[in-house]
Amino acid sequence: MKSIAFLIATLLVVAGCTSKSQSSSATTAMGASDLAVSIAFVPDPPQKGLDKLTITIKDSAGNPVAGAAVTLDTSMPTMSMAGPSPVAHDNGDGTYSANLNAQYATTWQFVVSAKSGDKTGRLQVREDVK
């Protein structure tokens, strides 16, 4: 009975994390030596035109990681097209900002990679641009 309650609680937490608001985020799972990478979009969901992306990098203890090498690649898989690779600017507080000019209303794939010292993190997420 306890395992069923735990399963239901876990599903409710996951469902709550996927609800849409003014900005949303997706987060990677991480191992003991990896970096956690998350991304938030404004507006959310992303729209055709200018979108602001905020990437957050944290270490395994949950501390913000400033000064990481962060790359952002985009593509539109349903159109078999590569997208732009916006530059992520370090805000000095573990967050990194980028702007994306989404020219097409389609499904976009975002791949964020981060490296700080010998630690790495990677996030891949798909968003429907309206």
Image (cartoon, rainbow, N blue to C red):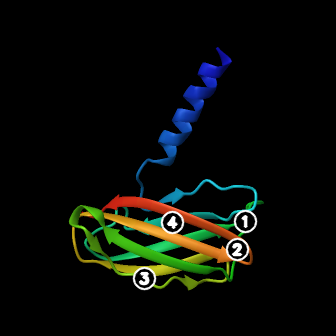
**In the visual, does 22 lie left or right of 105?**
right
Classify 10 Å Cα crowding around label 4: few (below 14), some (14-19), many (20 and above). many
Task: Please tell me which residue lies in front, 122 or 62.
Answer: 122
Q: Nearer the viewer, residue 1 or 33?
A: 33
Point out the image quarter for the N terminus.
top right
Distance (Cα) linking label 1 and label 2: 6 Å
Please give the residue where the numbered disc 3 appears in the rendered image.
Answer: 86
Q: Which residue is mark 1?
A: 59
Marks 3 and 1, Cα distance to the nearest angstrom?
23 Å
Residue 129 against residue 118 in the figure, above or below: above
Q: Position of residue 124 (x, y in %)?
A: 47, 62
Mark positioned earlier in the residue sequence (4 or 1): 4
Q: Amino acid at mark 2?
A: Val
N-terminal of the pair, mark 2 or mark 4, is 4
Against 26, residue 100 (above or below) is: below
Image side of residue 77 versus residue 3, left or right: left
- Callout 2 touching callout 3 (CB < 8 Å): no
Which is closer to the viewer, label 4 or label 3?
3
Residue contact between numbered discs 1 and 2, judged by CB atoms under 8 Å:
yes
Q: Which residue is mark 2?
A: 65
The quarter of the picture where residue 69 lies is: bottom right
Label 3 neighbourhood size at 10 Å, few (<14), some (14-19), many (20+)?
A: some
Residue at 70 percent across and 55 percent down: it is 31
State the image coordinates of residue 43 (x, y, percent, origin top left): 37, 67
The disc, 4 or 3, on the residue closer to the chain's N-terminal end is 4
Question: Which residue position holds label 4?
Answer: 39
